[in-house]
Amino acid sequence: MEEKRTMWRSKQRREKLTEILPLSTPLTINVEISSSCNLRCCYCLQSLDKCQKEKQKFLPRNMEYNIFKKLVDGCKQFDRKIKVLKLCGLGEPLINPRLEDMIKYANESGYFEKIILFSNGVLLTPERTDKIMQSGGIDSVLLDIQGISADDYLRYAGITIDYEKFIENIQYFFAQSRERNTEVFAKAYRFALNNQTERFFELFAPIADYVSIDNIYEVFKNVDYSGLITTQDTFGNEIDYKNTEYCPQPLFLLAVNADGTIEACCNTQDRNESDLVIGDIRNETLYHIWNGKRLKFIRNSILRNGKVFPKCKDCKLIENFADSDIIDTNIEKLRQVYL
Ligand code: SF4
């Protein structure tokens, strides 16, 4: 049991970024196959009312299958496989009824070394699990758990669930995933565990490969974070926030929103801020966007001056990147390569 306790970020095995830059092929492509969610978690933009979401140009929609296919097909132009395709974003991927077709298409393309699904798991019924397995399966799933009881789900995620059934469903997924060697991560935010961290480990260690507790930080504008911020990691140690100045994300990642627009990083929450929008998969290929002028401008601006874009100034993500991705200490070397 003990050995299952981990930090999610520490399990994202990746080479030290500064040793492999510049990249002809992105390492990671994040794809938001749905911007709708079945939960209204109190720390998420999904908890805001319709009017507030619309103000941030955040509309619930499923990515069209043809857009996803075009995105995958375009990866043929890169000279290497993409290390990770992440099905993630601000919505719940299982809401998209074509999720399994998308997984199948991505698997069969052979363009991705790994496919990772980010999900709250509430819609992960045995039927969906079977379909995911039949589609060739995924390499990892990161399950965001909102508490250790149905009461917690009502309080923190605004939904009534049958908690026992939820656990049974994850157990079923875990059992089915053994054949495909799918890694199952269960992650909860510390505030939602109400000091019952041991109970969380007891519940999820038997039905996951890794169990971690994460801290919450203020990601979304207009969301009230009072009472939610905690500063301890899975092991109860104080988290060492990094004072990072130079964001590495535009150097290795592309983030595709449900409508097909593409951003240079995973901070895709306020869609009024278009500084980091670099293209649209409906009109261009990922290859052209990756090698295009807009992304070059963003990379160079960041490498020269750090947090130059308005979104970067308030960005908390930059304080939480994995150590292997930090580029600050190599900034001079990178300027010589890129500028
Ligand atoms: S600092 Fe934040 S907003 Fe700026 S590029 Fe990095 S992840 Fe995006």
Image (spheres, rainbow, N blue to C red):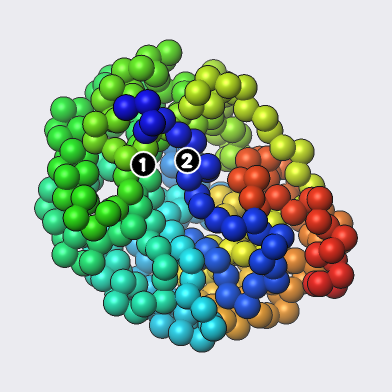
Task: Please state the horizontal and vertical placement of residue 309, each as a whole percent of the image.
Answer: 76, 55
Q: Is residue 15 visible?
A: yes
Quadrant holding the C terminus: bottom right
Task: Please state the horizontal and vertical placement of residue 196, each as a whole percent of the image.
Answer: 37, 14
Tell me which corner region of the image, top left, top right, bottom left or bottom right, holds residue 229.
Answer: top right
Q: Are marks 2 and 1 in contact (CB under 8 Å)?
A: yes
Q: Is residue 264 left or right of residue 90?
A: right
Kindly report the distance in space between the C-alpha atoms of the residues bearing marks 2 and 1.
Answer: 8 Å
Q: Which mark is residue 185?
A: 1
Residue at coordinates 29% horizontally, 30% vertically from top-left? 205
Task: Please state the horizontal and vertical placement of residue 141, each as a whole percent of the image.
Answer: 34, 49
* Nearer to me, 301 or 129: 129
Tell me which corner region of the image, top left, top right, bottom left or bottom right, holds residue 138.
Answer: bottom left
Residue at coordinates 75% horizontally, 66% vertically from top-left? 299
Q: Which mark is residue 231?
A: none
Label 2 neighbour load within 10 Å: few <14, some 14-19, many 20+? some
* Nearer to me, 42 or 4: 4
Q: Is residue 153 visible?
A: no
Q: Earlier in the sequence, mark 2 or mark 1?
A: 2
Q: Is residue 336 left or right of residue 318?
A: right
Residue at coordinates 41% horizontally, 83% vertically from top-left? 73
> Dot 1: what SS?
strand
Asked whether mark 1 lies closer than 8 Å to ligand 1, one says no
> Dot 2: what SS?
helix
Task: Please state the horizontal and vertical placement of residue 116, each as a whole percent of the image.
Answer: 38, 56
Label 1 neighbour load within 10 Å: few <14, some 14-19, many 20+? many
Q: What's under tag 1, amino acid-wise?
A: Phe
In the image, residue 201 sits, relative to residue 138, either above or below, namely above
Which residue is under mark 2? 8
